[in-house]
Amino acid sequence: MEATAQEVDTTVRAAHAARSALADRAVRSAFLRAAADGLEASKDHLVEAADAETALGPVRLTGELARTCYQLRAFADIVDEGAFLDVVINHPDDTATPPIPDLRRYKVPLGVVAVYSASNFPFAFSVAGGDTASALGAGCPVVVKAHPDHPGLSELVASVLRRAAATQGIPEGVIGLVHGFEAGIELIKHPLVTAAGFTGSIRGGRALFDAAAARPVPIPFHGELGSLNPVVITEAAAAERAEAIGAGLAGSMTLGVGQFCVKPGLVLAPAGASGDRLLKSLTDAVSDTEAGVLLDHRMRDNFVAGVAERAELPDVDTPVTPGAGGEHTVSAGFLTVAAQKLTSEGAYDLLLEECFGPVTVVARYEDDAEAQAVLSRLPGNLTATVHLSTEESAGEGRGAEILAELTPLAGRVLVNGWPTGVAVAPAQHHGGPYPATTSTSTSVGGTAIERWLRPVAYQNAPAALLPAELRDENPLGLPRRFNGRLER
């Protein structure tokens, strides 16, 4: 199934040729809804195929497919509303300094978008996932590089999307699909590809990011690469509800066998009696967690080797030892270390790197300064979490200060919750400083559509030549800012 360079070229050119068919917003939104309807109609077959390739289970996969359909319809609503076009019109004003000519600005689609599928979300971050849905909503054809962990499912989902395109008179080439490592390299280099979305490892994402920047014409690369997702538990919070926090942490770090990009990978917990209670609760809950199957043997090997290397560091304890379970499974566990070991550069930096799978590191801090010193050394993350006491949540103590310390580290900051579970909502932001992502954008939520658009302004263009979106009479009924006033 490995695509040749010629096949990649043919696929990209077919997508490029289909771009004009996406020009009508009504057609685009109808296409997205038809895609959601088609996926739902094929639910049983798709879930069965996904489970056969990923072993994620029908319950998890059925929920993920429902999320995927919701995303498609949500972007259809965004397309219908039209606010994402960001229409701004300024009539001439000779009294301004300097004088203002007639200016009309909106956003247009970039062109063909390359989407690199994720292993851990075969529906929601793959062929019909958020990158694809948002790109199509923006008016951009898509070529997907299928993930090798679910190639058969990728073909099935692509066929559903192509049938949906055909119902709206859109060429099936609007959704291209290629397989293979070399095909992924060829795709990012293709001159007709104008942007890319990626979800995966730091190593793979950085290689593609560099390739995108090294092109004769560099292109935007919106990559989600890796995240430690730190959690800070204050001493007062631990004293108030250590057992509940320990149990919640266990559920979050083992959810989906620890194969979520927002899994909490580093926890700063207080030393002392309250921290001991928290660890006891965490130990009990993780010990009761059944072994699970990772997505492929490469990930399993990396997980087993990664936890072993971390556990071998001096003064690192394993209250519940993570590692190999049966022949194909892994067991969940966690490591503990004194936070002081992480406050300066050295061998313990390994504990500040993501380890994909059901494991977390609990660093015990003696005082606030020690916790702050660890936070100051962390790279960018998708999420950062703090657990506060009732009084701290009401504004007493250091709650606001800790939020301020976490804000530079992540794109989503949580209070008294757990990061696993990324709601698809207009206010969502799923991104963060590098290496969490390579841009300031989000891959989840309505504003994800902005990644695939660019602004263009027309100056003194005759009314008869203007796009309908920029005409004074507003024939499309778009939200816009007209001579400084917001019109809805």
Image (tube, helix red, strand yellow):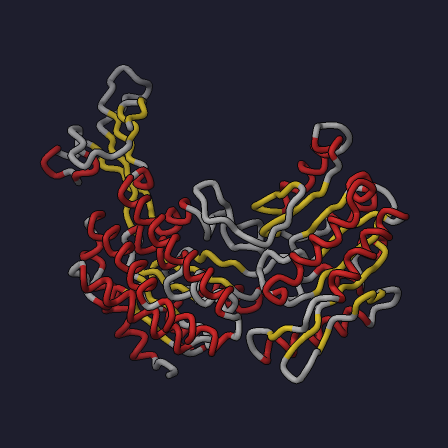
**x, y percent for residue 145:** 40, 70
- Left or right: residue 291 versus residue 60 is right
Residue at (28, 26) in percent of width and height: 487
Q: Visible in this render: residue 45?
A: yes
**Looking at the rendering, which quadrant does residue 240 occupy?**
top right
- Left or right: residue 135 versus residue 201 is left
Q: Visible in this render: residue 218?
A: no
**x, y percent for residue 140:** 29, 56
Residue at (83, 52) in percent of width and height: 364
Tell which residue pokes out farthest to the top in this image: 95
Residue at (29, 63) in percent of width and height: 38
**x, y percent for residue 236:** 81, 38
Where is the N terminus found, in terms of image quarters?
Answer: bottom left
**x, y percent for residue 396:** 75, 28
Residue at (66, 46) in percent of width and height: 385
**Looking at the rendering, which quadrant does residue 128 occupy?**
bottom left
